[in-house]
Image: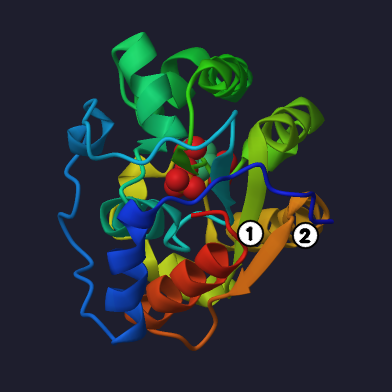
Amino acid sequence: MMRASRARTTPKARPAYDLMRSGARIERRDIGRRGALEQPSATYVAHEGCDHIFFVGFLGVGKSTLARNLGQLFNRHYVDTDQLVERSLGKTVAEVFSEDGEDFFRDVETVQLGHLRVRKSLLVSCGGGIIEREENCDLMHDMGVVVFLDGDLVDSLRQIRRPEKRPDLGTAAHAEELYCHRRPLYEGTADITIDVRNRTFEQVALESGKLLWERGLL
Ligand code: S3P
């Protein structure tokens, strides 16, 4: 269900949209290196209220890359909930899973998500399991709009280049089980669903940028 947006678009982002309509090339790698887009900058767009856009979806579907690139194009700050957890604990997600367990990881994830309430107009790439807790879904709806990137399990698995960094994945059978369990949760939480099947990364970025702009969310 879509709620009325409180976002107020500003002329600053318009050139990005024109660029996208003209079929601009968007690089997959290295746009907005880790943390680079989190620095305060006079050029970034501040909207009214807490109007974040949360990107959810199965691991490897391209949430971080999309949020980072849209942030660059539309002058919006980008954050990644996994990075927020890692920075708050001073260890990697894989270390947290193995040393402290998944429940602890989920607790910290919820705390970090809640901290976003005091920020504005963020593009938030969420860990794939964020929808496992209803509390997180409520938090995201309170703070903005949830966009589900709906992709194939096989495509997701192909995108995952470093399996040792994905403690949650386990075997292929477990990944499939997780995917089937989570897909309805993503669908039930989403305000907007973007089908990324059979699309290149560039198509996804262009289409979602256009859609979110036209709905007044970027
Ligand atoms: C998880 C996905 C990961 C990370 C953690 C747990 C999951 O995030 O939060 O490893 O349960 O699906 P990405 O989806 O960004 O890889």
x%, y% of residue 146? 66, 49
Residue under circle 1?
Answer: 148
Is residue 176 placed above or below 67 in the rendered structure?
Answer: below
Q: Which mark is residue 187?
A: 2
Amino acid type of disc 1?
Phe
Residue 65 visible in the current orientation: no
Is residue 154 placed above or below 160 in the rendered structure?
Answer: below
Total marks drawn? 2
| The quarter of the displayed image where residue 117 is located | top right
x%, y% of residue 215? 62, 63
Amino acid type of disc 2?
Glu
Is residue 150 placed above or below 71 in the rendered structure?
Answer: below
Give the position of the N terminus as an image quadrant: bottom right
First-in-chain label (2 vs 1): 1
| Residue found 27% across the figure and 76% down from its top | 19
| Secondary structure category for the residue under label 2 | helix
| Secondary structure category for the residue under label 1 | strand
| Residue found 73% across the figure and 60% down from its top | 183
Q: Are marks 2 and 1 in contact (CB under 8 Å)?
A: yes
| The quarter of the displayed image where residue 141 is located | top right
Residue 140 visible in the current orientation: yes
